[in-house]
Amino acid sequence: MSGVRVLVGTRKGAFVLTSDARREQWDVHGPEFAGWEVYHVKGSPVDPDRLYASQSSGWFGQVIQRSDDGGVTWVPMGNRFEYDGVPGTHQWYDGTPHPWEFARVWHLEPSPFDLDTVYAGVEDAALFRSTDGGSEWQELSGLRGHDTGSSWQPGAGGLCLHTIVLDPSNPERMFVAISAAGAFRTDDAGKTWRPVNRGLRSDGIPDEDAEVGHCVHRITMHPSNPDVLFMQKHWDVLRTDNGGESWTEVSGDLPSDFGFPIAVHAHEPETVYVVPIKSDSEHYPPEGRLRVYRSRTGGNDWEPLTDGLPQDNCYVNVLRDAMDVDSLDSCGVYFGTTGGQVYASADAGDSWQPIVRDLPPVLSVEVQTLP
Amino acid sequence: MKQPTTQPTTQPTTQPTARRVIRVVLPYHLRAMARVDGEVRLDVDGAITQASVLDALETRYPALRGTVRDQATHRRRAFVRFFACERDLSHEPADAPLPEAVAAGDEPLLVVGAMAGG
């Protein structure tokens, strides 16, 4: 019988939540790597039992863990992330040059084509690749070496490469997003990159057509439609229909277009989910009401989804990597909060229930649909 | 072809290299990473220094590479400290001899996760 495995990274460890396809009863396993920050856990599309986890600590640095049995056992892998060549500098908050310094891995993206190939997005922003299942890591330095690289500046959370989108129909094409540089695309498997931020408008950037400097929070793609991407920017929700050549705002009637995650329905490429947050000054839901908003029209027209979600006195946040969908016939939608709740909907967002209520603050949620 | 440094035939002297058993106490999270309980005992050849002890530690427990010191520069991580014999040795040169009591195995080298964060 098919089922679902939800991989949860938190401030104090990783958790694996499993259910059968009814998604009513959940088994909670964890914490793994207890006491460590786990920014991300993600499974391989090639073999769902191959998982990678990013475990880090201000004291003891970065550890990469790998499981080959769906999260039952883990083995530490290579954790040597060295920038290619002389690292050079990027801009610091005050505009002065600042050396590139590795801090942590924010996001791990296993290849849909090869079991042992996995990408890592790191802070300070760079993209690394391993082709041996996580033992050795090499920087794809064409990204950081882009002409604009020395002008990139960190966002409030650091200069982090937090999003990696692999085109499942074209191994040569990838997208990444960096706070606060913007979105970038490669069409040669990572050798060369170019910014794809045309159409983004960011208050505070003097040049409204600036090539970089945009605080992109998250981009996502439906696998059947790889030229269409959706973006949650610091402010604004946008879409592109041409692989990032140009973006159009689709915030429409959202109560706030600030937020972090954005996800697409597994079977409906024009059905999109966001979690509006009141503002970048307050970082909690408008009016203390936790609402997922769904658009069935690819943006602009949004409906609030509230059944089962707290509608008063709720002041949590939902971080950029903390929302995902399953691909069962009735698409499941999942998200985790900074209050430690992981909510699940087995009916595409119409109703919600908490799987767990009291985890540490949730940093990431990834969902695997198991055969 | 470069010879492995551990080949006895490459040693310039006829004296066997001294080997000592060094006691090391790791903080909780690193014991968990290494999957050990209590203090660890390491066979260390030659001079007993922070560097040689950490070399031996990382050889015996590869999962600890990068957690105590940077893998490329070998600089101590900022929030890790080394104590022994009621002294803070964190700022001593990595190749300075450790106290004789540590080299003799009478006292452990303490690897400490600094208290920080409020």
Image: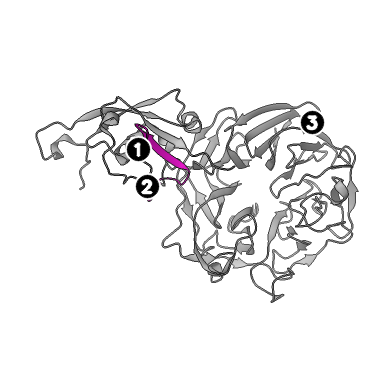
Spot the residue most to the left.
Answer: B14
Which residue is pictured at 22% across the width and 41% down the height? B4
From the viewer's side, name the closer residue of A29 and B19. B19
**Dot 3 amino acid type:** Arg
Instruction: Between label 1 and label 3, give the one nearer the viewer.
Output: 1
A38 with respect to A250 (left or right):
left
B67 with respect to A223 (left or right):
left
Badge number at residue A23: 3
Letter of the chain that mark 1 sits on in the rendering: B
Instruction: Between label 2 and label 3, give the one nearer the viewer.
Output: 2
- Residue A327: percent from left, percent from top: 76, 40
**Circle 3 crowding by C-alpha within 10 Å: few under 14, some 14–19, many from 20:** some
Letter of the chain that mark 2 sits on in the rendering: B
The residue labelled by disc 2 is: B74
Q: Are marks 1 and 2 in contact (CB under 8 Å)?
A: yes
Asked if residue B72 is among those painted magenta in the image, a careful observer would answer yes
Q: Are marks 2 and 3 in contact (CB under 8 Å)?
A: no
Q: What whole-number distance in Å separates the C-alpha atoms at marks 1 and 3?
A: 48 Å
From the viewer's side, name the closer residue of A34 and A47. A34
State which tag comes first along the sequence, 1 or 2. Answer: 1
**Is label 3 in a helix, a strand or a loop?**
loop
Residue B115 shows up from this direction? yes
Q: What whole-number distance in Å separates the C-alpha atoms at marks 2 and 3?
A: 48 Å
Letter of the chain that mark 3 sits on in the rendering: A
Badge number at residue B54: 1
**Circle 1 crowding by C-alpha within 10 Å: few under 14, some 14–19, many from 20:** many
The segment highlighted magenta reads B71-88
